[in-house]
Amino acid sequence: MENEFYRHYKDRVVPALRERHKYKNVHQIPRVHKVVINTSVGSQTDIKQALDEAKAELALITGQQPAETRSKKSIANFKLRKNQIIGAKVTLRGDRMYEFLERLIKAALPRIRDFRGVSPRCFDGNGNYTLGVPDQTIFPEIEMDKIKRNIGFDVTIVTTARTDEEAKSLLSELGMPFSDRAKKLAMASPSEGGRAGQVQAA
């Protein structure tokens, strides 16, 4: 069965992007290539225990077993040795990627206290976007009473877009709540702003 969020991309996002950017070829239309979720436990005193907990939490959130990440070089000031295990990461593609994006956008981000949207300034110049998540509790899959420590992680959304502008259009159409878009909605007329606010909150 086709993933619902992917079907939304095909049926709604693709036509909207084609109209906005006047793409002549369907292969020019940007898409999400992969999503990488990465966490570091290098600053923890009990690295092995922290790593096991981080891997378990990432597996629960993503539905995929994380891979361990290692340091590329030694840094004496941080007591870091080359090839030392410092964290874990998960690379999502296909259905799991779209399922994760849907949960991130529709369920997790709205659970952040006083949430006002994500920053539009976190693109890397090549059409990829990185979002910092302060802790894992924003995901509904996490049981609060079983958490032993907060685990922050980065979510990097790698797209096929050629520019940051195109990538932002893609993510906006997918529902990513950028903070500058929220400001524009707030400046709309009362009737328009009210309707837009309900859509965004939903």
Image (cartoon, rainbow, N blue to C red):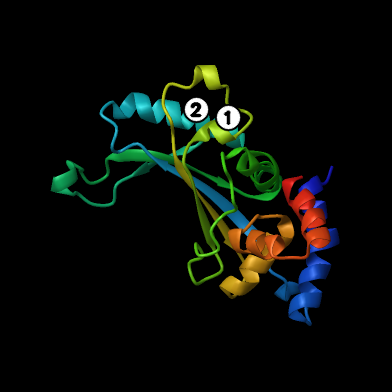
The x and y percentages for residue 188 are 74, 65
What number of labels is visible?
2
| Residue at the far front in the pictured view | 190
Q: Residues within 10 Å of mark 1 (few under 14, many from 20)?
A: some
Mark number displayed over residue 56: 2
Residue 78 visible from this viewpoint:
yes
Name the side, left or right, on which 149 lies relative to 178: left
Label 1 element class = helix
The amino acid type, in three-letter code, at marker 2 is Ala
The x and y percentages for residue 145 are 53, 17
Quadrant of residue 15 in the image?
bottom right
| Residue at the far left in the pictured view | 76
Mark number displayed over residue 60: 1
> What residue lies at 60% left-to-right and 63% top-to-bottom?
180
The amino acid type, in three-letter code, at marker 1 is Leu
Tags 1 and 2 touching, CB below 8 Å: yes
The one of 59 and 107 positioned closer to us in this rendering: 107
